[in-house]
Amino acid sequence: MKKRISQFLDEIKHTSTEQKRLVIDIALILTVCLLGFYFAKEHDVFELLVEVTRDYEAWELDELFTLLMFSGVALFSITIRNIKFLKKEITRRQDAEDEIKRLAFFDGLTGLPNRQLFTNRLEHFISYAKRTDAIAGVMFIDLDNFKEVNDTYGHAIGDELLVLFSKRLKGHLRNDDTLSRFAGDEFVILLGSIKNTQDLPLIASKIVNCVRQPFALAGNEVHVGMSIGIATFPNDGCVAEDLFKNADTAMYHAKSEGKNTYRFFSSELDAVAKYKLSIANQLRKALERKEFTLHYQPIIDKSTNLVKGAEALLRWHNETLGHVSPADFVPIAEEVGIIQAIGDWVVKEACQQAKQWHSFGHKEFVMSVNMSAKQLANDAFVAYVKKCLEKIQLPSHALTLELTESTVMYDVDGAASRLRQLKALGLSIAIDDFGTGYSSLAYLHALPIDRIKIDRSFVMKLTEDKDSVLMVETMIMLAENLQLAVTVEGVETQQQKEFFNDTSIDKLQGFYFSKPVSAEEFEQHFLSNQLVDSITA
């Protein structure tokens, strides 16, 4: 693109040079002609030519003079024609230059200023603001769930949505504000010459609310939201790139807090962003450095109080960062694209540990492993699990794969197909954190699952909240009707444990029995004596 623009500009410069030369040539010709005519008139040159022609009639000078005269007229005509042609060519190339400027500085889809032009305008405003103590706001906008629109309706509809969105958004801005499209579904607004930063929340709320009404696309009503990050000049940066970076950081914070909202940049957010960047950098070599370990939380049989299995939970200790919570590093691993490799390592490590405990005589022990959305979406995952079971020689019934409701809902049909393939290996499938996601009777009936795990958030309030009791009882009854087994997570007190004595649930899990512990501790506390009686670690 840059090469094409450079070629066009060179051609235009060349055309401009040709025009100057032609004007100079015409001026010289006219000057010479005028001087010649003046000289001829002053010295009676025409009469002299007539006399010479008569004296040398044999030389046919009259025909020569006539030829020269017609040649001059022809030359002048050609010059006039070339001027007209050159004028058209200059106009064409000027149009081409305008098109190049449009392509270079404006977005081809929406017609909005692109990043280069926006940056230029922001830098000019910053120079002006430094002289006048003006305040500016930069809003970094990202559409929520735009990928789902593209996946559902196609990229053509997605492009149409971007055009309609940009027009609607522009209609809610002042004339001196600049709206730019940076890339994809990312837009940036420059709010110049605002009186004070207290005006920004009102402006941001107005912008967020402008997309509450759906967009009409291909006969469908499409709903989208937006997440906005706000940085101000001069508080959050005095150069364009700093303002972009800080507004972008605030935007990601808005997304993490539920989307369809706005957040201001702060030094705390900057610290969080830098911490996440450190996590991302260290994660890339964590597998190679063997920094990951698995801890195991026992799963208890309610009727016998025996340890019947464990859930394998990932832990990470880094020399630089220390112990990092899975809540912090797992989402980042998904963002940077290494969750698949980490998840595969967890499956293999957990299977090896289960095999070792089976070899100690605990043949009924079942290992539960969490499965990510990336793994479920990967066509090779089923083959990988099969290879692990065969290579480690772990019976397939000794493995349960757990996934959340939201993981399934990304692609219900694709998830159902892969889950059936996994079930065909002989292992079990469980829905983890049940009740916190997209609970649906339709998908519960359609998916080949064996067990649901009631989320700890419902168990925590059992002794004080009647609604939680009703919810738990309803989920247990639902599982009974669908012939699904039930595990209760988050059991932390004797009262909570006793609540389930007269229910049909068969497995319990929680801190009342034990927190997640290392393999060595698990063997010592639970496999040497499988009977559990209010053990707390």
Image (tube, rainbow, N blue to C red):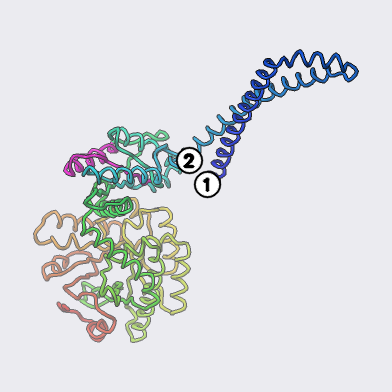
- Per the image, is 186 magenta? yes
Closer to the N terminus: mark 2 or mark 1?
A: 1
Q: Is residue 257 left or right of residue 180?
A: left
| Amino acid of disc 2 | Leu
Residue in front for this viewpoint, 537 or 263? 263
Position of residue 239 measured from the top left corner of the image (x, y, whole percent): 30, 52
In this rendering, position of residue 454 left or right of residue 93: left
Identify whether 89 is placed above or below 337.
above
Instruction: State whether residue 369 is above or below residue 204.
Output: below
Label 2 close to label 1 by CB (< 8 Å): yes
Q: Which residue is mark 2?
A: 103
Residue found at the very far right of the displayed protein: 58
Percent of width and height locating residue 341: 41, 69
Q: Position of residue 80 (x, y in %)?
A: 65, 23
Would you call the spot at circle 2 few (<14 residues within 10 Å), some (14-19), or many (20 or more)?
Answer: some
Q: Which residues are magenta?
A: 185-212
Inspect the image, locate mark 1, and give the three-letter code of the amino acid beneath it: Met
| Residue appearing at x 33%, y 83% in the figure | 357
